Image: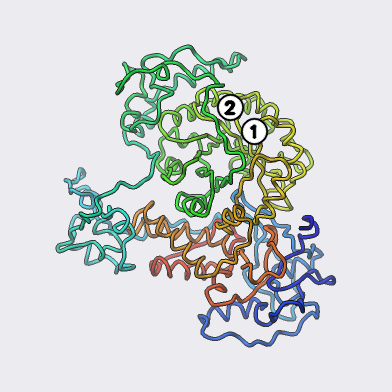
């Protein structure tokens, strides 16, 4: 293994970097031909449009003898001619969940034309069509008829949904497949006649069949939002006595201390998670709590900080909380490949306190997630502390994480995310207040600082230890860097000593087991894997088995198929559930396309900050999975979820993740 600087120019598909232009030339030692794998953008898409029936001409176009313009994307060639580096490193930025900010041009430059300065495709696709899954299911059947047993509609004649099952079935689109994942998994499909795979479990007269021998199993997902609690949150009827007490002490400049006892009207704080129906009704302190079983000391006496549950995850592989792509089905895929610790997507504390269903959905936990936490984002001690108390008595988690690393302007300008690193007073109150009201460990995820040349993490880490944080994860980039350049693991190594004895996890640019081994040599307690898991969810297996996995295209398609099955279980198998699963699949494919198969690499490993040239895979499917065009991702989704609706539109969240 060489250093990062020596390896940063490595990117190639059966190729080697030339000394002249920085882009690959053929190595005579490999028994493969450039004409088989390397290609141009035009020939790449010609091959896909031909649906793999025949390969394009094997002759290469005339160009630089060093091979500089053979496999380069057009936008990269333009950047190289503008004087930018040609060592394989990207200089483009990315959003908080790993998306690059410097994209490809929508139209390639004409051959022979002098390329003109083009506007960089960066930033989010804010003008993209936000089509909700309900848009594709306009003639919906009333939920009162879908649930079993059917009930009378509470809205009567004012209901805007259909109540005629025969009319609904006549207008319903054809089934997407002969097998229903929910029916095969649980013995019963909750979607009933609205299921897009209903032919597998509908009997005469549209009756929903149930497998008696299998029995009806409840979906194994925890941390749902109870309706009664949601109503109380919306009406602001929930009392936060512990949070208010901690905030009063902080406002007077006192360190919050554990009270000797909790008032009778408060819920049993140290008790394990109970039924959400009970939790929702005890929040207003209006009378004694209805309990079940014997009363123990844990029910009435607050735990001291030294008695809190320990978070011992040293040496474990930690899947980072990934906005949009880090959903429950994706976490299940990563758990299957060896992820030890998982964390839900970033949830905004104010939205949780308002009882928003979409925000509470980010807290859901599957039974396979044995070590699971949730991540909160907020800018003020009162909302963060109250939200922590609310989660402490309503959800089942092993730790709560504070997001101090989000770089996007929407969060930063409100004082959250990375901005907390410069607001040490508020940051201290948030950590102390949340640590006081939580019975589970509190962790923090932060970046090196706000400005690239002014790191702050090494100053904050000793303070975080005294404030009450049990563990800190450090991403080796500043907010200013976003995801450009390489993560600074030398600085992370310095921070390990500053944080001791508090465990410190490192994060940044891990895409192979060599990267993980090199990261562990810095002394960190473990590594957090973010974008690497999006490109290679099997990366956890590679790290544990210390090998490179030359996974085939059919195996990668099977992983996507498992994701769609998990998505249908989680979001439902009706039209809304299918299209929501498809949308998250397409967002994930915008990262998967950046993976280069191990069998095509001349030098291992692939680097996370390198972008491959255009290449033809060993078969049609491998080539299709390498496409960077959204239309090809939609084609892959149709292989798994059937044809898209007639007016289906998709653009990834970031402009650089696909081109037309």
Farthest right residue in view: 20
What residue is drawn where x is 51% and y is 51%? 324
**Vertical placement of 434 versus 114: above or below?**
above
Give the crowd class for mark 1: few <14, some 14-19, many >=20 residues within 10 Å: many
Query: Could you say where residue 339 lies in the image, as x and y percent from the top left?
Result: 54, 49
Q: Quadrant of the C terminus?
A: bottom right
Tell me if label 2 and label 1 are in contact, CB under 8 Å.
Answer: yes
**Dot 1 corresponds to which residue?**
420
**Dot 2 corresponds to which residue?**
430
Quadrant in the picture for residue 423: top right
**Vertical placement of 201 versus 115: above or below?**
above
Give the crowd class for mark 2: few <14, some 14-19, many >=20 residues within 10 Å: many
**Vertical placement of 612 versus 45: above or below?**
above
Q: Earlier in the sequence, mark 2 or mark 1?
A: 1
Quadrant in the picture for residue 232: top left
Quadrant in the picture for residue 568: bottom left
Q: How far apart are the two marked residues, 2 and 1, measured between alpha carbons?
A: 10 Å
Secondary element at image label 1: helix
Farthest front residue in view: 545
Secondary element at image label 2: helix
């Amino acid at each position: 293994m060489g250093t990062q600087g020596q390896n940063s120019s490595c990117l190639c598909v059966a190729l080697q970097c030339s000394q002249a232009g920085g882009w690959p030339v053929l190595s005579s030692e490999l028994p493969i031909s450039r004409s088989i794998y390397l290609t141009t953008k035009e020939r790449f898409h010609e091959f896909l449009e031909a649906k793999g029936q025949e390969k394009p001409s094997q002759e290469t176009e005339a160009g630089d003898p060093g091979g500089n313009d053979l496999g380069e994307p057009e936008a990269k060639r333009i950047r190289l001619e503008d004087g930018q580096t040609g060592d394989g490193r990207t200089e483009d930025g990315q959003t908080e969940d790993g998306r690059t900010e410097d994209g490809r041009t929508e139209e390639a430059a004409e051959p022979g034309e002098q390329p003109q300065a083009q506007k960089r495709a960066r930033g989010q696709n804010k003008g993209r069509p936000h089509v909700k899954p309900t848009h594709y299911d306009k003639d919906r059947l009333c939920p009162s008829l879908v649930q079993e047993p059917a009930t009378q509609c509470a809205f009567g004649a004012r209901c805007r949904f259909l109540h005629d099952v025969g009319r609904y079935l006549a207008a319903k689109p054809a089934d997407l497949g002969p097998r229903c994942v929910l029916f095969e998994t649980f013995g019963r499909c909750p979607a009933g006649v609205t299921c897009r795979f209903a032919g597998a479990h509908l009997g005469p007269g549209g009756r929903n069949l149930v497998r008696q021998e299998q029995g009806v199993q409840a979906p194994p997902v925890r941390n749902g939002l109870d309706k009664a609690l949601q109503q109380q949150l919306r009406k602001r009827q929930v009392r936060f006595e512990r949070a208010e007490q901690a905030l009063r002490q902080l406002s007077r400049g006192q360190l919050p201390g554990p009270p000797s006892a909790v008032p009778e009207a408060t819920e049993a704080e140290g008790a394990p998670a109970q039924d959400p129906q009970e939790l929702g009704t005890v929040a207003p302190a209006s009378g004694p709590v209805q309990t079940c079983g014997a009363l123990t000391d844990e029910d009435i006496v607050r735990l001291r900080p030294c008695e809190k549950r320990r978070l011992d995850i040293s040496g474990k592989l930690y899947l980072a909380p990934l906005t949009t792509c880090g959903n429950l089905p994706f976490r299940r895929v990563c758990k299957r490949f060896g992820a030890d610790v998982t964390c839900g997507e970033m949830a905004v504390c104010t939205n949780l306190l308002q009882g928003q269903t979409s925000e509470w959905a980010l807290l859901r936990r599957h039974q396979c997630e044995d070590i699971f936490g949730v991540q909160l984002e907020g800018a003020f001690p009162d909302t963060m502390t109250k939200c922590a108390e609310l989660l402490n008595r309503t959800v089942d988690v092993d730790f709560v994480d504070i997001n101090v690393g989000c770089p996007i302007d929407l969060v930063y300008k409100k004082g959250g995310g990375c901005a907390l690193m410069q607001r040490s007073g508020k940051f201290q109150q948030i950590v102390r207040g949340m640590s006081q009201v939580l019975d589970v460990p509190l962790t923090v995820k932060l970046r090196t600082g706000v400005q690239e040349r002014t790191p702050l993490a090494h100053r904050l880490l000793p303070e975080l230890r005294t404030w009450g944080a049990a563990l800190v994860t450090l991403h080796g980039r500043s907010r200013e860097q976003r995801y450009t350049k390489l993560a600074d693991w030398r600085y992370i190594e310095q921070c390990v000593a500053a944080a001791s004895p508090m465990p410190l996890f490192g994060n940044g640019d891990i895409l192979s087991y060599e990267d993980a081994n090199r990261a562990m040599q810095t002394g960190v307690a473990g590594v957090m894997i973010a974008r690497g898991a999006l490109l290679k969810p099997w990366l956890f297996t590679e790290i544990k088995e210390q090998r490179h996995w030359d996974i085939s295209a059919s195996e990668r398609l099977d992983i996507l198929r498992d994701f769609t099955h998990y998505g249908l279980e989680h979001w439902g198998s009706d039209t809304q559930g299918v299209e929501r699963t498809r949308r998250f699949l397409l967002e994930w494919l915008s990262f998967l396309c950046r993976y280069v198969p191990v069998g095509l690499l001349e030098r291992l490993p692939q680097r996370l900050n390198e972008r491959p040239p255009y290449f033809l895979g060993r078969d049609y499917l491998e080539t299709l999975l390498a496409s960077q065009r959204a239309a090809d991702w939609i084609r892959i989704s149709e292989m798994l979820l059937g044809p898209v609706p007639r007016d289906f539109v998709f653009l990834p969240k970031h402009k650089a993740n696909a081109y037309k």
